[in-house]
Amino acid sequence: MNEPLTKPQNIPAESTPKKNTPHLFFWLVLPLIGLAIVVRLALNWCTYTDFLKLSRINIAGNHLMTKADIIKTARFNFNTNLLKIDLLGARERLESQPYIRAAIVSRHFPNQVDILIKERIPVCFVNINKLYLVDSEGVILPLPSANFKANLPIITGFDSNSVRIKLGSRSPNRYLLEGIKLLQVAAQRTPAFYAEISEIHYLQDGEFILYTLNGGTPIFLRRGNPEKQLDILVRFQATLRDKRSLTDYQYIDLRWDKQIIAKERNS
């Protein structure tokens, strides 16, 4: 029996180079650590220098509140480090004020804070043993500390027990809200007639008397549907044209269905 010419030899497998994982991780993390140290040192430097000291407060959107009152409410102090200012707390304090519906407070580096105010817009005065302002949602507002000049109609005939005065809160009185809606409808649909409204006086059960600015002609309005009543009144005014005006009447009564009762002053 013939033996093989050569004997099989053990051939070692090719060796695979080992990955140096710890070293690779080290070189990846090292730059990040260095960057964090640089940022930290930069912040520390800004903290102990005047670079980030608050020196300017930019305020926009305010009409009822003065800038001094806004800064006082937000509790901002000049020369305070910008990074230490509590923006959330300042916003919450501002929005707790009756006049302010919403506020946005932000940093503007290196040394400024921006305050954007959205105020409530008064639509009329209301006299409830004292003069207040009311916005379109029926939120009761105090008169501003600054001189407030606005040619707004006034709502009368309510007492403090029925309206439940709480500054910055919506009145729960449904009839006061109906009076406000009446003014809103007049302003939107008949702006020329709205400019003639001087006062709306609450009678009872949702009925109002509307007084015009010139002549003080009382116009009796029944409960509900202010759009229809205003349309009737405007059409009636249009039929007068140059012959007569609302001031020529002693009163006008819209409380009757499908008719308008008007009494002339000289009749």
Image (tube, rainbow, N blue to C red):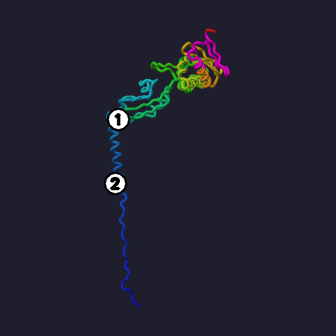
Q: Is residue 227 above or below residue 31?
A: above
State the image coordinates of residue 183 (x, y, percent, origin top left): 56, 23
Q: Which label belongs to residue 27? A: 2
Disc 1 crowd rating (10 Å Cα; few below 14, some 14-19, many 20+) is some
Q: How many numbered circles does the render carry?
A: 2
Circle 2 — which element? helix
Specify the quadrant of the image occupied by residue 43: top left
Residue for point 56% across, 12% down: 215
Q: Which label belongs to residue 179? A: none
Circle 1 — which element? loop
Q: CA distance from mark 2 to mark 1?
A: 34 Å
Residue 50 visible in this rendered orientation of the protein: yes
State the image coordinates of residue 266 (x, y, percent, origin top left): 61, 8
- Asked whether, in this view, residue 259 is left or right of residue 65, the answer is right
Q: Amino acid at mark 2?
A: Trp
Q: Is residue 40 above or below residue 70?
A: below
Specify the quadrant of the image occupied by residue 216: top right
Residue 86 visible in this rendered orientation of the protein: no
Asked if the residues shown at circle 2 and circle 1 are in contact, with their CB atoms under 8 angstroms apart, the answer is no
Extreme-bottom residue of the structure: 1
Q: Is 259 inside the magenta-drawn segment?
A: yes
Q: Amino acid at mark 1?
A: Pro
Q: Which label belongs to residue 110? A: 1
Foreground residue, 169 or 204? Answer: 204
Per the rendered image, the range of residues in magenta is 236-265
State the image coordinates of residue 140 (x, y, percent, origin top left): 54, 23
Q: Is 44 inside the magenta-drawn segment?
A: no
Disc 2 crowd rating (10 Å Cα; few below 14, some 14-19, many 20+) is few
